[in-house]
Amino acid sequence: MTASLLPVRPTPRPGEPLSSYAVRLADANGLARGRVLPAWRHDIDVPMRELSTIGSLAALDPGAATQLTMDRYPLAVRGHGPQRRHGWRLHHAVAWVCPSCTVSTGHRELLWQTALVPVCLRCSCYLIRAGSPRIVVPAPPRVLEIVQGLAELAEASVADRGARQVLYRRRRRCQYLATTIGQDSFDLGGDLPPVDLAAARAWGAYPCPDPATVAALLVLTSPRRGRGSRPAHLRCGQSSVFTDADRDRLDWFLTRLRQNVDHDDLRTDHVPSMLPPPQGEAERKPGAWLSLTRAATALHMLISQANGHTETPGAAMTALGVVGIPSCILIDGIHAGQGLREQDGDLLTTALQQLLTAGLVDYQRRRDTLRPVTRLPGTTLRRLPTTLATIPEFRRLALAWIWTRFTHGPMRSSPWPTTPDRDVATFDKRLDPETRLLLHEMGQQLLADTDLLQIPATQATWAGIARRYG
């Protein structure tokens, strides 16, 4: 018998596991969870009949229901065989939760069931094992940076064989280090948690069950570490100390920016939240938004200095709408005035030239203009095919597409920061030319309406056009 459609159907959250969504769906309708999904289901190897049941109850298509499970990930992530061994997935008896948001809101994420994400990126703290004392321990920026990159790599591995190979090799390195590491073979420093050697030794067919230990192992096996924080048998010897040439390069770049400020009226408002990709790359690679957003933050700080102001990294990130992203050596070197490395200088120089060639678009104005737009105007909906205009997911991704197209920023800077950039990229590839043109015209009209008012895009600006765009 086909399950009946429930009256209250919450929308799945980005990264939410099927078990968590089943609880929310059941609670919203006053049902026991077992009526929606068996209590012993662990978000993997979910039978199609159970996915069909949830789809019928919540009006989800099979693809949307599968997105909530581990089944869409490759074997390198979800593990091999019926027991799901030798992957990144934790043993089914191990559950990681956030001591902050899980306790208060019940929030859980699908990738918390893997050793790839031992921290909560929302709360910037280490996860804990379910049932452990709820102690919130903040994670340092470099741990958040590594975990963010691994989470994006896991999503890219769904379609990218190269990403799967990277994850496979990384797991082997972590497993080897976990079985050989000793208290006298490394120095973690004060910004990493202590390693539980007993938990580390437990890394075998399944990853280590302790999230803090996993975080330390991920840092120690990261290719972007300094000499003092890695074991002797894993050190790469790469130094991050700025040279005299780096300091001269920073002074030269600031001199060039001052000339652009005088002759081209260059301002920080002309910096998008994400710089264009390096020359020779037609599109951004999976996960590249973070590095390009950091570069945009660095350029924002440099232009501010060229205009005679002192700006902190936090202020630059706030202006670009990307508050909370981890810092990096590029940003720290500019903030401290220590230098600008050659590869970073080439990236900023190329990006600056592209911005000047494009005519110095006021991206800050575009961000202020488009941020209050939370729904498609009626005139646009009437011109869309009925099959598209009635789909909430299409309307949401259409607004996200307009944001990324006109602000040149990642979804992290948008009103929907949890929407993955990969979803917008997939949406862009599937757009037919007529719909693409219609959405592009809508974005142009939104910006044109604000320009006609000839005042900054503030609350007063939007009072005049709220009736049209909501």
Image (cartoon, rainbow, N blue to C red):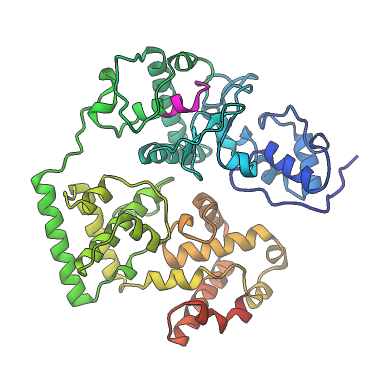
Q: Is residue 399 left or right of residue 237?
A: right
Q: Is residue 205 left or right of residue 290?
A: right
The answer to whether residue 392 is visible is yes
Quadrant where the image shows the C terminus: bottom right
Q: Position of residue 468 (x, y in %)?
A: 62, 80
Q: Is residue 286 above or below residue 273?
A: above
Q: Is residue 146 left or right of residue 40?
A: left
Q: Position of residue 389 (x, y in %)?
A: 69, 66
Q: Is residue 442 above or below residue 288?
A: below
Q: Residue furthest right?
A: 1
Q: Position of residue 60 (x, y in %)?
A: 73, 48
- The residue under the point 38% across, 18% down is 177
- The residue under the point 60% across, 23% down is 94
197 is within the stretch colored magenta = no
Number of on-image labels: 0
Q: Quadrant of residue 229?
A: top left
Q: Is residue 421 above or below residue 33?
A: below
What is the magenta segment's predominant secondary structure? helix
Q: Nearer the viewer, residue 351 or 294?
A: 294
Q: Position of residue 396 (x, y in %)?
A: 61, 61
Q: Quadrant of residue 463?
A: bottom right
The answer to whether residue 168 is visible is no
214 is within the stretch colored magenta = yes
- The residue under the point 69% across, 60% down is 391
Q: Which residues are magenta?
A: 208-215
Q: Nearer the viewer, residue 73 or 253?
A: 253
- The residue under the point 34% across, 26% down is 220
Quadrant where the image shows the N terminus: top right
Q: Quadrant of residue 357?
A: bottom left
